[in-house]
Image (tube, rainbow, N blue to C red):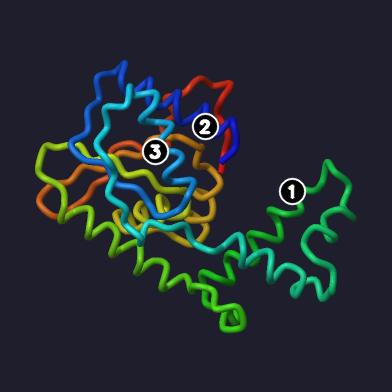
C-alpha cells in the first residue's frame, strides 16, 4: 500500500475514535492491502481494535488484471499495456484507459470474454463469492452490534448490488466513485442488510483519493 494509503487509514482510525464509534468485531479480506489498511486504522484508533477475522471471499475481483490482458487483444496489438499507453499523450492517458477499461468491464459482466486461458474469475463467480462473504458476515453478527469489515472497491460494490439491484451502468459508475478509506454502512435487521450510508469520507479532503 502507498504511503498516502497508510496516512488515509490512520486518519480514518483517528476519526472513528474521536466519534466514539466502537466495534464488537473486525473482519478483513485476505489481501495484503486489507491487512495494511486495518493496521493503519487500528493505529489511529489507539490499537484497541480486536484481532481481525479473515474472510477469503472478500478478496478483490480480477477486473484490473482482466483489462490489462484483454485491452491489447481488443486493439489487435502485440504491445503490452504499458507500451500502449506510453504512446498516448500523458494528458489523455487516464481518459483513454478508462474508455478501454469500461469496454472490457462490460464484456466481463456480460460473460463475453474467454477467461479460460488465464483462469480468470468470471463475474458470476465473483458475485457468488461476494454473496457468500455477506452471508458469513451475517452469521457472525449480533443485533445492535457494530462489525467493521475492511475490503476493497469491487467487493464493496458487490455487496451494495446484493442489497439493491443495480444495472450494469450503475455498477460501473459506482466502481469509479468509491473513495479510498471511505465508509459504507449497512444495517442488519433479522437476516436482511439495508444500505444506510455509501462512500462517506471521514478523512481530511486533502487526503482523499479514488480507487
Q: Which residue is mark 2?
A: 6
Give SS at disc 3.
Answer: helix
Residue at image location 77% in from the left, 70% down from the top: 72
* Nearer to me, 3 or 134: 3
Q: Is residue 87 left or right of residue 44?
A: right
Instruction: Give how far apart the Cα atoms at labels 1 and 2 are.
Output: 27 Å
Q: Which mark is residue 95?
A: 1
Q: Earlier in the sequence, mark 3 or mark 2?
A: 2
Q: Nearer the viewer, mark 1 or mark 2?
A: 2
Q: Position of residue 4 (x, y in %)?
A: 58, 30
Instruction: Give how far apart the Cα atoms at labels 1 and 3 are.
Output: 31 Å
Relative to 88, say whether 44 is above or below: above
Q: Position of residue 161 (x, y in %)?
A: 37, 56
The quadrant of the image that shows the C terminus is top right
Residue at image location 49% in from the left, 61% down from the top: 61
Q: Is residue 83 left or right of residue 191?
A: right
Q: Earlier in the sequence, mark 1 or mark 2?
A: 2
Relative to 104, say whether 21 is above or below: above
Q: Earlier in the sequence, mark 1 or mark 3?
A: 3
Q: Residues within 10 Å of mark 1 (few under 14, many from 20)?
A: few
Instruction: Please say if the residues under marks 1 and 2 sit with CB atoms less than 8 Å apart.
Output: no
Q: Is residue 207 left or right of residue 185?
A: right
Q: Residues within 10 Å of mark 2 (few under 14, many from 20)?
A: some
Q: Is residue 3 left or right of residue 142?
A: right
Q: Which residue is mark 3?
A: 38
Question: Picture quarter containing residue 22?
Answer: top left
Amino acid at each position: 500500500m502507498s504511503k498516502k494509503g497508510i496516512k488515509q487509514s490512520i486518519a480514518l482510525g483517528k476519526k472513528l475514535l474521536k466519534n466514539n464509534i466502537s466495534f464488537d468485531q473486525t473482519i478483513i479480506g485476505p489481501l495484503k492491502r486489507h491487512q495494511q489498511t486495518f493496521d493503519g486504522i487500528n493505529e489511529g484508533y489507539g490499537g484497541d481494535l480486536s484481532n481481525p477475522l479473515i474472510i477469503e471471499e472478500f478478496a478483490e475481483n480480477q477486473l484490473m488484471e482482466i483489462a490489462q490482458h484483454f485491452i491489447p487483444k481488443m486493439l489487435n496489438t502485440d504491445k503490452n499495456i504499458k507500451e500502449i499507453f506510453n504512446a498516448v499523450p500523458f494528458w489523455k492517458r487516464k481518459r483513454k484507459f478508462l474508455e478501454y477499461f469500461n469496454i472490457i468491464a462490460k464484456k466481463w459482466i456480460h460473460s463475453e470474454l474467454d477467461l479460460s486461458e488465464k483462469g480468470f474469475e468470471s463475474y458470476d463467480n465473483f458475485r457468488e463469492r461476494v454473496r457468500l462473504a455477506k452471508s458469513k458476515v451475517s452469521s457472525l453478527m449480533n443485533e445492535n452490534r457494530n462489525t467493521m469489515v475492511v475490503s476493497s472497491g469491487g467487493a464493496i460494490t458487490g455487496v451494495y448490488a446484493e442489497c439493491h439491484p443495480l444495472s450494469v451502468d450503475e455498477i460501473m459508475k459506482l466502481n469509479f466513485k468509491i473513495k479510498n478509506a471511505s465508509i459504507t454502512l449497512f444495517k442488519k435487521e433479522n437476516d436482511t442488510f439495508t444500505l444506510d450510508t455509501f462512500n462517506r469520507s471521514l478523512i481530511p479532503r486533502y487526503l482523499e483519493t479514488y480507487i
